[in-house]
Image (spheres, helix red, strand yellow):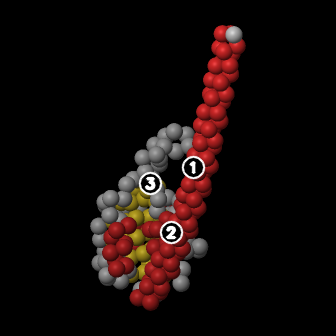
Amino acid sequence: MEKKHNHALWYTLLIALCLILGVKYWQAAELTSSLEGMLNAAAQEHQKAIEEFNTLHQDYEEIQQALIAESAPLPVRAETDVLSELIAQLDDGDYAVHRTEDGGLEYCPIPAGYLADKAAEYCAASYEPAKQPDAAGQPAAALDEDDCSWWLVRPDCVAGFDLTCGFISAERGTSGETLIKIDAARSFAGAFFNR
């Protein structure tokens, strides 16, 4: 009789344990479902924020282009096709410079005020040279004028840009250390010529 009582007690404990585990499993499943819902909601909010940022950035670039189109003079074809010679001539203010498809140079004075402040921002000392190695693991090579199509020429520096990177020279030279993340500066310089 005592053995039957022990078996009944073990069955009761086993059933109670199964019930407890079942409840815990159900709670874990509910928590997992709730967390998945929160994660999906956060991912949707993140995607929405990215889309809003991209829209605002595009609006900003359109406003900047409109400001340039309205306030900056039209580009002027330089008398020289040698960048260093043109830089030496452009020593009295801020300029955007562009190499044309035929190899010539155009320049456009950057009006004082907001646009000149933006040019100064893009040439500021806080612009960090790239320290990343190239594909072969070597330090990134310095860029020169042959690698660039657009430049910002200021009394205190020259910054050159191509499609993916650029350079900055505090000595107003035609080469310098490679810069990364130059999309905004390149778009700014290009806007003087794409109108």
Dot 1: what SS? Answer: helix
Label 2 SS = helix
- Residue ID for mark 1: 35
Report crowding for label 2: few under 14, some 14 to 19, many 20 or more residues within 10 A (C-alpha): few
- Left or right, 171 with reference to 130: left
Which quadrant does the N terminus fall into?
top right
Residue identifier under label 3: 178
- Disc 3 element: strand
Q: Residue at x 68, y 19 (%)?
A: 8
Where is residue 5? Give x, y as percent.
66, 15
Q: Amino acid at mark 1?
A: Leu
> Residue farthest to the front?
1
User: Does residue 1 appear in the picture of this structure?
Assistant: yes
Instruction: Tell me the distance, in whole angstroms, between the alpha carbons under discs 3 and 1.
Output: 44 Å
- Who's the residue at 47% across and 77% down the image? 60
Structural distance between the alpha carbons of marks 2 and 1: 26 Å
Q: Amino acid at mark 3?
A: Thr
Mark 3 or 1, closer to the camera: 1
Q: Dot 3: few (<14), some (14–19), or many (≥20) neighbours within 10 Å?
A: many
Q: Give the residue number, with chain letter if any, for mark 2.
A: 53
The answer to which quarter of the image holds residue 29 is top right
Query: Tag 3 or tag 2, which sits nearer the N-term?
Result: 2
Of the pair 146 and 125, the residue shown nearer to us: 125
Where is residue 181? Give x, y as percent. Answer: 47, 59
Q: Mark 2: which amino acid?
A: Phe
Task: Give the residue furthest to the top.
Answer: 2
Q: Which residue shows up at 29% across the image and 67% down it?
A: 156
Whole-percent x and y of residue 7?
A: 69, 15
